[in-house]
Amino acid sequence: MAAMTVPLVTVGEYLHSSYDPDVDYVDGALEDRNVGEFDHAWIQRAIFLAFAKHEARLGYLVLQELRVQISATRYRVPDTCLLRAEQLPDRIVEQPPLLCIEVLSPEDRFSRVRTKCQDYLTMGVPEVWIFDPESRTAYTLKGDTMTEHRTGLLRLESLGLEIEMTEIFGILEDR
């Protein structure tokens, strides 16, 4: 059986096109993002609310589904990211965010999400978090280290910020 070819798209075509939902651009190929399911949306909402209440005090912005330029041929769209308040992009984030966050959907393969997170780390993002609504687990990635969290606090050392796991996953229990 012949291998299926994926039509390549130029960076310019990607940057001047709209996709609903937005897609990642990886070396000429468009990669779908799994979004749109209830638990994914609820967790993403909880994350946004947990971080938004500290924005002014700590000098950052929490944004959702914003294109981040990893390299000349890679653009990723994290579910949520934190930018320094003075880091506002014209259109696309070109400097490493303080934090990138991914929320797993049932269709996601962990290895694919991990590859995406490695791109953020390679770009210079100091820390990446992954939330799994199904298992109520969070993973923090720093360099080559991945730590699993099922309870307690998640700490973003660069801002001195702590987020309680129940603040994120409790939203699923309350509905």
Image (spheres, rainbow, N blue to C red):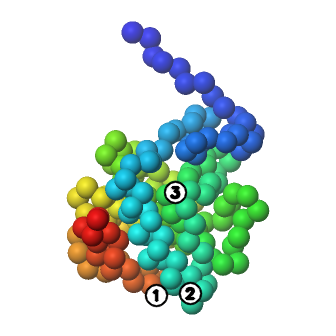
* Residue pointed to by mark 2: 58
- Give how far across and how far down residue 37 sits, in percent: 39, 49
Left-right relation of 10 to 112 = right
Q: Which of the marked residues, 3 or 1, is nearer the chain's N terminus?
A: 3
Distance of label 2 from label 3 (alpha carbons): 21 Å
Crowding near the residue tagged with mark 1, few <14, some 14–19, many ≥20 C-alpha atoms within 10 Å: few
Q: Which residue is mark 1?
A: 160
Among the 4 quarters of the image, the one containing residue 26: top right
For disc 3, the marked residue is 78
* Other-residue count near label 2 (Cα within 10 Å), few / some / many at <14 / 14–19 / ≥20: few
Q: Which residue is painted at 40% across and 45% down in the image? A: 112
* Residue depicted at x 30% and y 59%: 133
Nearer the observer: mark 3 or 1; the answer is 3
Q: Residue furthest front?
A: 175
1 vs 2, front mark: 2
The residue most toward the top is 1
Crowdedness of circle 3 by 10 Å Cα count: few (<14), some, many (20+)? many
In the displayed structure, does residue 164 sit left or right of residue 19?
left
- Viewer-nearest residue: 121 or 68: 68
Name the secondary structure under disc 2. helix
Q: Is residue 127 left or right of residue 69?
A: left
Task: Choose between 34 and 121: the one closer to the eye.
Answer: 34
CA separation, marks 1 and 2?
9 Å
The amino acid beneath tag 1 is Gly
